Amino acid sequence: MVQQFGGYFSPETMHVEPLVLERHPDEDRGLSPFKEKTSISTRPPLTAEKLFDAANNNGNKARGLNVLLYGAVGTGKSTVVRKLVLDWCAGSVFSQFKLVLPFSCEDLSHLSKPTSLRDLVGRKYMHLRKTPYLSGDNDKAKDVLFIFNGMEKMKLDFRIGSTELCSDPNEALPSGAVVVNLLRKYLLPEASILVTTRLSAVDRVPKKYINRYVQICGFNDPVRQRAYFTSRLLQQNEGKPGKLTETLIEMLYLNLQRESQLATACFLPSYCWLTCATLHLLHFTDTKSPVRTLTGIYTSFMRLNFGGEVITVDGNVSSQEQQNSLMLYVVRTVGKLAFDGITNKRTSFSAEELEQWVGGKTKTDEELQQLAVFRTDVLDFFLVSRDDHGKDPESGGRRYVFAVPAMQEYLAALYVVLGENKTVLEKLTKEVSEALGQASEDISSLLSILSKIIPFRIFAIFNLLKLFPKFFERVSSHSKGRIANTMAAEMFRSEDSFNEDVLDQVEQSLLGVHGPQPQEESYTRSFELYPIFMGGLLHYGNRRLLDQLGCSIKSNTVSQITRALRKHLIKESQKKQPPEELMDLLVLLYEFQNPRLTAEVLQSIKTINLSTVRMTPHKCFVLSMVLSCTSSSYHLNELNLSSCHITPELLQMLWPAFHHTSNL
């Protein structure tokens, strides 16, 4: 993700400290899983220098401190750890430690062979293979700080019958046993340890082994949020505040001060990242920029927060077959809720609806435990209580909305493209076809034997079973055609013809609507990003990221959807579209990143009328990139950019498009 935005989005270039408080996790227990973000206590914030204050060691100077830093998804735990390590390298924090050793618990959980602490360190930091600080002699370990980031991804068992005691740094043990003995203070008791984890995994370490609990609370006020946005957006101009940057920061700050939905979302630094990345795409795209898409930003955002995780209980999964990726679990629960909202044109949901869609059909104890973990760690990441008009006049209950409006459309699109909204027939045929496919060799062998001894009619039934996969293929093809039909229908809805183009809608969701406000807010709105996200998710780069998240979209699925979509797009593009709808079509083709499909659709378009569309750097880039997919002989009869606020800088970006224009 750092590479994706040209190095601007890294802790080395800027950092705004999230709020960190000394707070025991028991203070958060007993609250509703759909709780509103509560106000932060008046306790003084902690700085990095005070995390390992000797006053918390109960007078036992012979032992190092164990500090547990916990927080929700997206609060910035990993970013804080990276910044601490960088600051220690620069000599600005943790001067009491001569050696800081950070480890990823996700990496440690994948180690299959037992290894000693020394070999564990030497494997990652070869130059420290023989360091005297890990010998266990002469209290040298008091100068060492171990950092274990993401403890929820490891299985730690503190029962002596399950994890043997060990005090020898040269003895080979499973990686989990090494961490357990460090925390027990049997292994290098003088060393200090910082562990980060989510709230659901806090109890995996018995309280007697933790000297201090610290909660990371994100950006709890508009001042911190503004500092973050200012630092990030100023990076675009190499630290020099340009007029555009200053305007964006001011509009963002005004929107945050309104206590808007965005302000609630930006409580989490991850959503600040998403906001900055989106604004960077919309306003700082230039001809030298690598190709970036809105779908790619949202998929990277998911990879950033949920990469490679599986739904577990107490750090364990009962069987390989029951392992579900956390992202797939999100799609099947929150994605289903999002899809239901779009189907029924709703953006807000009652607590009862959340209960219905998120875990309403769970039956086993294990499923209920998984649901509890999911609610504790993940659900509040996506859904927030609506501050304005928070009471539902019909039911009298509180309503919940997606933290960022576009997130509902992204998750609904992912739910559809992954095929989770199958009909009963499609699910049945898929299961039967897979079962027959796995047993096809056995059936063939069996038929060759039975054909000699059983009646002909029974033998004919077995032959019919062999034809079933072809029937499934037809049903599956129909399903992919239905997805393409949905994309086309959502793209060209007549009631959306008078809306602003989709990129302007995205910008307004971040910067707010400035000027006269509507007398009454309408909670029904168009979902024009929904089909665009569906197209973007079929691009290979996004599919590769999703595959890392445990959400696989097969290549033959993409080709089937693309074939069906091509017909719909060509048919609709031949009709005269309003400028805003035509801009949305160009955005869809750009997000799809399929030059061949784009060229075939453009062959049926002879005039592009974008008059009155407010052109931005990204829109100009989209127009040029889409037209560059055509052959050199392709020319538009007319390209209409009147009243589009074209500046000299935007004119330069449009030169490639002008090469395919006969009349401008």
Image (cartoon, helix red, strand yellow):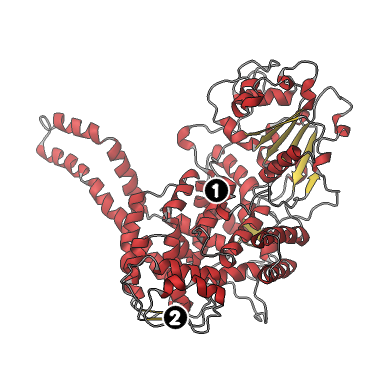
- Residue 573, relative to residue 35: is it above or below? below
Q: Indicate whether 229 appears above or below 151.
A: below
Residue depicted at x 83% and y 48%: 45
Residue labelled with disc 2: 578
Circle 2 sits in a helix, a strand or a loop, which is it?
loop
Task: Report x, y in % for residue 381.
Answer: 63, 53
User: Regarding mark 1 in the picture, which secondary structure is present there?
Assistant: helix
Residues at marks 1 and 2, CA–CA distance in whole angstroms: 36 Å
Let me know if residue 314 appears in the view. Answer: no
Q: Which residue is mark 1?
A: 303
- What is the quadrant of the C terminus in the image? bottom left
Among the 4 quarters of the image, the one containing residue 452: top left
Whether residue 160 can be seen here: yes
Question: Few, some or many C-alpha atoms within 10 Å of disc 2 (few <14, some 14-19, many ≥20)?
Answer: some
Q: Nearer the viewer, residue 17 or 231?
A: 231
The numbered mark, 1 or 2, whose residue comes first in the sequence reads: 1
Q: Nearer the viewer, residue 495 or 266?
A: 266
Identity, as a three-letter code, of the amino acid under mark 1: Arg
Where, by quadrant of the figure, is residue 223 drawn? bottom right
Question: Residue at left 22%, top 43%?
Answer: 465
- Image position of 220 (left or right of 284): right
